[in-house]
Image: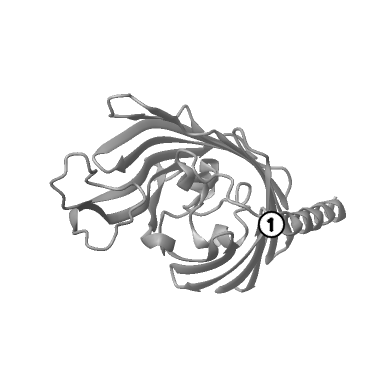
Amino acid sequence: MKKVLKTLFLVALSVGTMSTAFAESAGQAGAYLKMGVGARALGMGSAFTALANDSTAAFWNPAGLARLEQSEASFMHADLTMDREYNFFNYAHVLKDKSGKKNGVAALSHVSFGVDGIPETRMATNDADKPATRPDGTYTAGENVYIFSYFKDAEKNTFGSYARKLSDKLYGGVNLKYLKHELFTNSASTWGLDFGLLYEACEKTTLGLSVRDIGETLDWNTASGHEDDVPLTTTFGVAYKARSNLTLAADINKVEDMDAKLFAGAEWWLQDYAALRLGSKDGDLTLGASFKLDTWQFDYSYADETLGDAHRVSASKKF
């Protein structure tokens, strides 16, 4: 069994590395929801569905929250191309009954993505037949151009989670989500659900399943009443503890109306306070590292993405 799992992981990693990388999800409603959170998971190629064992599990697989023994808070910030910002923060709290026995884990998380201060420019003109704006944003010599106002393109996802142990080896979790998209003077919102399962098949092998963005349709407050369906995402994962300090993981990620993608990664703890990571996210190389200091953990990840290098830094603290 040990040799089979190692072979499967190496095949998955090599196939993922050779595949062609491109941003398939661009243009879809809620595309930012596919970007992932936490530099630890991102450094492993986002292969975190079966490994999920920190507070970011609320995003990857809420069932993983049930394995937390201490309450934990996480934060991530990233400055992206085209002046976009991507932020995540959450807090997971271990619930206990009057006798002090663990009774599940609850979490509150928030993800934001977008850009503020986009100028709306207009040309100064008294000609009623001449448009006050140009869709391509270009102007000719001699035209007076003024910044009329500023607007933003902002997407937000706020969700509450609850997870608990269902049996000796099975964990379950669910998210209730509220999504909102603000663009210029219009906005759209929706409620949705995620759920996840995590099964400890044996001492070294864990299986995970997550289904995200269930029943989410963004309803715009426009005259046309336009609607954007957020595609369902289903992910199956396996994590294998090859050694006490080495974990291998692989995910099959399927977004509705798109081809399945392969994520694979490895996490190697050099000491109790330092770790290195390697992964492949649908062919894009990822790297990562961690450093622990008392109850704090600082994580870094790098990804060779289609639009350029992506660096992420996150921090977490146990309570």
**Percent from the top left, x then y, of residue 291?**
51, 73
**Percent from the top left, x then y, of residue 223?**
27, 25
The image quarter containing residue 222 is top left
> Most extreme residue toward the left, as rendered?
126
Residue 80 visible? The answer is no
The structure residue drawn at horizontal position 61% and vertical position 35%, both measured from the top left corner, is: 167
Left or right: 143 with respect to 306?
Answer: left
Q: Is residue 57 above or below residue 192?
A: below
**Percent from the top left, x then y, of residue 274?**
57, 74
The structure residue drawn at horizontal position 86% and vertical position 51%, both measured from the top left corner, is: 4
Q: Is residue 143 above or below residue 166?
A: below
Left or right: 164 with respect to 73?
Answer: right
177 and 146: which is toward the camera: 146
Q: Secondary structure at mark 1?
A: loop
Q: Is residue 74 above or below residue 129?
A: below
Question: Residue at label 1?
Answer: 283
Quarter placement of the C terminus: bottom left
60 and 258: which is toward the camera: 258
The image quarter containing residue 302 is bottom right
The residue carrying pointer 1 sits among few (fewer than 14), some (14 to 19) or many (20 or more) residues within 10 Å by Cα, namely: many
Amino acid type of the residue tagged 1 in the rendering: Gly
264 and 267: which is toward the camera: 264
